[in-house]
Amino acid sequence: MRVILIKRFVTIVMLISVLGICLGVPAEAADVSPSTPYSGDIWNRSTLTGDWGGLRNQLAENGVTLDLSMTQIGQGVVRGGKSGAWQYGGRGDIVMNIDSQKLGLWPGAFLNLEAEGNWASAVNRNTGALMPVNNSQILPLPGENFDLISLNFSQFLSPYFGLTIGKYATVTATSGDMNEFAHGKGDTQFMNMALNFNPLMALTVPYSTLGTGLIVLPTKDPKEAIVTLMILQANGQPNTSGFGDLDGNKITLAAEGRVRTDFFSLTGHQLFGTSFSNKKFTSIDQRLGSIVETRALDGKKGSWNLYYNFDQYLYEPKKGVEKGVGLFGRLGVADGDPNFMKFFGSFGVGGKGVFDSRPLDQFGLGYYFINIANPTIQGPLQTRSFLRDEYGFEAYYNFAITPWLNLTPDIQIVRGAQKDKITLGSPIPVIASKKSISTSTTLGLRLQMVF
């Protein structure tokens, strides 16, 4: 116990020290030429390692970019939930993009490669919530992993139309449920999965999977409008190639469109999407007699969802520079069985570079709600329900110590879907013990470094 307290004390002292540095050294945007994006002194350049003696800028000018980052997070459930243990973990990410035309080859071709891994542990299992409060720690898989999650090739046949094939990290592929104020892997904006993308898609669209499809740019500019139509492997995994498990009965069809708007002469975006899978999933409605007789859970063929998101600046000091304050929101509906998340909604406020003295800082406040179609086990005497509707709140402020070093205090208050901590008997799944799980409060601190 004494060792744990000492570790916590040392951690708190270190974090306070770093926070003091953060507040005392305002980060500024790197004042560099577009032809030398990695140049500048150590306090103002975009990455810690800089331009590698000019090589990195030369590669970028010739269509090859290599970006590396590491995100470290310490979190603890300080009230409620299932456990109050503090956890530390992190994730590393490597992204390479190649533009064939800039490389001196043929025009319109692009290659994307991404590898990532995480280490140590997270508090996700301690809150009683379905949604991870540390989204970064489940990518590419919970636990200690390092995998090639994306390797795909796109070829545009005209300025308006292209084909793509390969393995995709679906959260970041093309538009990927993009949102100006609430998007990503939990390393720059919100940490909770529910505020980074619509979780209704998680059942039908694997995080890392094989696929092929079409990319349509109605105005030639992907920032103005983009439409994607994809055929994806429904059982893809980050740690496998996927070629050994291709099956026509396990595919997902996904379509998404995003357009930039100009309401009130302020920048915004509207996004609509849907996905359908013909895979056979585990049904949320189970009968105890059937489980005992067949020693297997009942299945249900197919699953679908529809989703929408928007972002809208309310204050934008200069149009097109991605700075200001605005609103965001997401809505989604799914089948209810096999997807037990039947309805989803989130909304909030986000800001980027609001203060002149801190042009790279970001902040966000968000709320989400999930309507649960409760999984049940129907026995001879009664039907048991295990989940309830889930909702949560998160607030963060991302201090940019330098353009490549960001420190983010974070707080989340979540009433998780798991209402009771249940221990099932064996071999027959009857309840052996039950303990109520209250609303959890989770504090966290995230440190991201871009190399």
Image (cartoon, grey):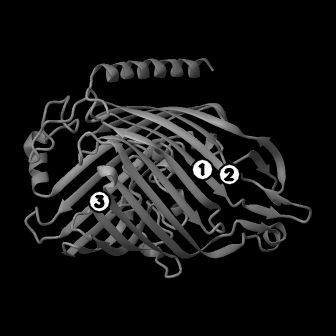
From this view, report whether residue 89 is shown above or below residue 277: above
Dividing the image into 4 quarters, which one contains the N terminus?
top right
Q: Is residue 191 left or right of residue 427?
A: left
Q: Is residue 83 visible?
A: yes
Write down the residue under mark 2: 389
- Please state, as top left, top right, bottom left or bottom right, where the C terminus lies in the image: top left
Local packing at callout 2 (Cα closer than 10 Å; few below 14, some 14-19, many 20+) is some
The numbered mark, 3 or 2, whose residue comes first in the sequence reads 3
Q: In the rendered image, which residue does mark 1 sit on? A: 369
Which residue is rendered at x = 82% and y = 53% of the image? 425
Q: Judge whether 354 appears above or below 253 on screen.
A: above
In this rendering, is residue 84 above or below 158?
above
**Helix, strand or loop at mark 1:** strand
* Count of labels in the image: 3
Hey, what amino acid is under mark 3? Leu
The three-letter code of the residue at mark 2 reads Asp
Quickly name the residue at label 3: 113
